[in-house]
Amino acid sequence: MTSPPLPTPRRIQGTYYTLVLGNTLAASFIWGVNTLFLLDAGLSNFEAFAANALFTAGMLIFEIPTGVVADTLGRRASYLIGTITLTVTTAMYWMLWLWHSPFWAWAIVSVLLGLGFTFFSGAVDAWLVDALRAVGYKGSLETVFGRSQIFSGSAMLVGSVLGGVVAQMSNLGAPFLVRVALLLAMFFVAAMLMRDIGFTPDRSEGPIAATGTVLRASLKYGLGRPPVRWLMLASPFTAGVGIYVFYALQPHLLQLWGDEGAYSIAGLAAALLSGASIVGGLMAPWVRKLFRKRTSTILLAAVTSALVLVTFGFVQNFWIAIGLVALWGIASAIDDPVHRAYLNAMIPSKQRATVLSFDSLMGSAGGVVIQPALGRVADISGYAVSLLWSGVISAAAIPFILLSRAAGSPADVGDTLDEETDAAPGGDAKAEV
C-alpha cells in the first residue's frame, strides 16, 4: 500500500497556526484573572506566586520525561496526552477555588498543571520544523514563527478580554470552565489534523533506557554546544522573570487604577500583551533584516525589556504604566520568533523535541526560584519594587546572549531551514562575529 501524499508547506503551517490559535485561546481565558483567582481563593501574595512557582516546578521536573514521549511515541501523541492532562487539571483548579482548599492542595495540582504543559513544550515546534523540512520548505523560520505570534496574540487578545468580562459578569471561576471546554475541542481538532511527518519515533528502547538516551542527547546537543548552551543559560533569567511579570501586572494595574474589583482592567494587561504579540510578530521578520546576526535582535529585545521593567519601579501613573506594558510586550514578542529560529537551526531533528524541552526546562528552573522571591518582595515593598528587581534580574541574561554570539554558530547568520545542524558542537568558531 502506498503512503498518502505529503501535505504542502502551506497546509502544514495552517495546521500549526490552528493549534497555536486554539491552545492560546484556551490558556488565555484565565491569564487575565489568574492571580486574582488565587487571591480570591484565600491565598496570600506569597502563596499565589508560590503556586505559580510550583506549576513551573512541575514543568522543570517533567520536561525531560515528556520530551522522551515526543521523541519516542511521537509529537502528535505528546500533544494529545498534554491536552487531556490540562483539561483534567484545569477542572481540578476550579474545584480547589470552589472549596477554598488549603495551600498544599494547590501545590499538588499546580505541579500537575505543569506536567500538562510539558507535553506541549518542544513537541509542537519540533513537529512543525520536521514537517517543513520533509516537504522541502525553503522560506524563513522567522516568518513562520512571527505569524504564529500574530495568531497567538490574536487569540490571547480575545481570550484575556473575554476571560475578564466573563469573570466580571459571573465569577472568577467561570473562565476556568470555559478553558476546559476549549481544551476538549482542541483535542478533537488535533486528532484529525496532526500526523508526524519527517520524523519516525524511536521505540527500540524501554521508557527508562529511552529517558537516559534522550537526556544524554540533550546534554550533547544542548549544553554540549557552546552557542546553544549560552542561549539556554540566559533562559532562567528571561523566562523566569517573564512569568512573574505577566501575572504581577494584573494586581499592579488594578492598584494604579484604584479599584481592585475591576477585573476587566486586570484583563487589560493580558490584552495589551496580546496586542503587543501581534505587533511583535509582524515586526520580527523586518527587525531581523536590519541585522546580519540573529543574536543582535535577541540582544536588542533583552536590553529593552530590562530597561522597561526597571522603569516600572518609578512609575505611579496608570496610563504611563499601560505604555510600558505595551513596550515590554513588543520587545518580548520580537525576540521570540528569532530566538526560536536560531535555536531550531542548531538542533538535529532526532533530538529536536527534547532539546527544545530542555531549553524550556532551563526557563522553568529560573521561574521556580524567581517567582516566589519576587512575590515576597511584592508582599513587603509592593509590586512596583518587585518589577524594578525583575528588570535587574533579567539583565543578567545579556552576558550569556553575548557569549552565544561570540561562539560563531552559522545559524546566527542564517535565514532559512537550510543552514543546519549536525556540525561539530559550537559551530564554526571562525565565523564572523
Image (cartoon, grey):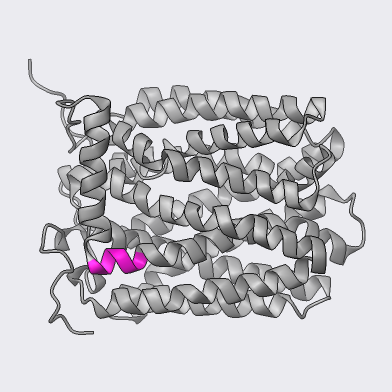
Q: Where is residue 329 in the image (x, y as percent from the top left)?
A: 58, 65
Up/down of 27 relative to 240, above or below: above
Principal secondary structure, stretch drawn in magenta:
helix
The residue nearer to you, when weighing 111 against 14, is 111
Q: Position of residue 43 (x, y in %)?
A: 80, 43
Number of residue marks: 0
Quarter of the picture holding the C terminus: bottom left
Quarter of the picture holding the N terminus: top left
Q: Where is residue 426 in the image (x, y as percent from the top left)?
A: 18, 68
User: From the viewer's perspective, is 391 left or right of 15?
Assistant: right
The residue at 83%/76% (across/down) is 316
The residue at 70%/34% (across/down) is 104
User: From the viewer's perspective, is 228 left or right of 329?
Assistant: left
The residue at 54%/65% (across/down) is 279
Q: Can residue 287 be seen in this view?
A: no
Up/down of 375 relative to 35, above or below: below
Up/down of 207 relative to 217, above or below: above
Q: Give the range drawn in magenta.
A: 226-231
Q: Is residue 228 magenta?
A: yes
The residue nearer to you, when weighing 248 against 153, is 248
The residue nearer to you, when weighing 130 against 432, is 432
The residue at 8%/20% (across/down) is 2
